[in-house]
Image (cartoon, helix red, strand yellow):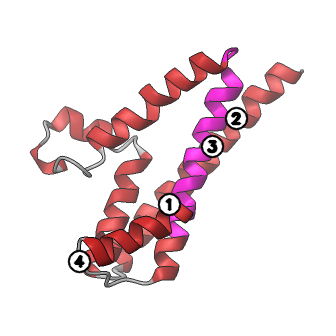
Amino acid sequence: MIGLVLCLLAAKFLFHIPFRGSLLVLTVVSVLYLLVALAIGLLISSAMKSQFVASQIALLVTFLPALMLSGFLFDLRSMPAVVRVITYLLPARYFVTLLQTVFLAGDIWTVILPNSVVLAAMAVLFFGLTRRVMRKQLG
């Protein structure tokens, strides 16, 4: 959350990006995204035997796809249709859409609510999978 505040301040004061939305909405959607990231991390770490393997898989499964396929670096509309379909599996895609909306357009609830619901569903799904994997290992 400290990183979020630093990025928000840098966007506003260093890069002069307008912030038209609500800080509360930004905080809530950021917490949702962090819950999804936490759940994925817990799932990977509980499924792997080695910390090194878990860190490598986490890098390949989360960071690289999120960077390349979230719409942060490249416009999603310019991607091939097959790749665009894959982006719907990535939580970062929904978070970037939420960030763009809150920063540039304001609190547009027709964008915020569906993307937030998807992030919440992903968090529930990954926490459920983590619970199942842990139960198998402990049982």
Q: Nearer the viewer, mark 3 or mark 4?
A: 4
Residue 69 lies, with reference to residue 107, above or below; the image says above
Question: Which residue corresponds to mark 3?
Answer: 39
Place of residue 24 in the rendered image (x, y in percent of width and height, measured from the top left): 52, 81
Nearer-N-terminus badge (3/1): 1
Identity of the amino acid at label 2? Thr
Q: Are marks 2 and 3 in contact (CB under 8 Å)?
A: yes
- Badge 2: residue crowd in 10 Å (few <14, some 14–19, many ≥20): many
Q: CA distance from mark 2 to mark 3?
A: 7 Å
Q: Nearer the viewer, mark 3 or mark 1?
A: 1
Q: In the image, which disc is placed on residue 130? A: 2
Identity of the amino acid at label 4? His
The main secondary structure of the magenta stretch is: helix
Of 127 and 63, the residue lying toward us: 63
Question: Which residue corresponds to mark 4?
Answer: 16
In reply to whether residue 44 is colored magenta, the answer given is: yes
Quarter residue 104 falls in: bottom left
Q: In the image, which disc is placed on residue 3? A: 1
Q: CA distance from mark 3 to mark 4?
A: 33 Å
Q: Are marks 4 and 1 in contact (CB under 8 Å)?
A: no
Of 4 and 34, the residue lying toward us: 4
Q: Secondary structure at mark 1?
A: helix
Over which residues does the magenta segment extend?
28-50
Q: Name the quadrant of the N terminus.
A: bottom right
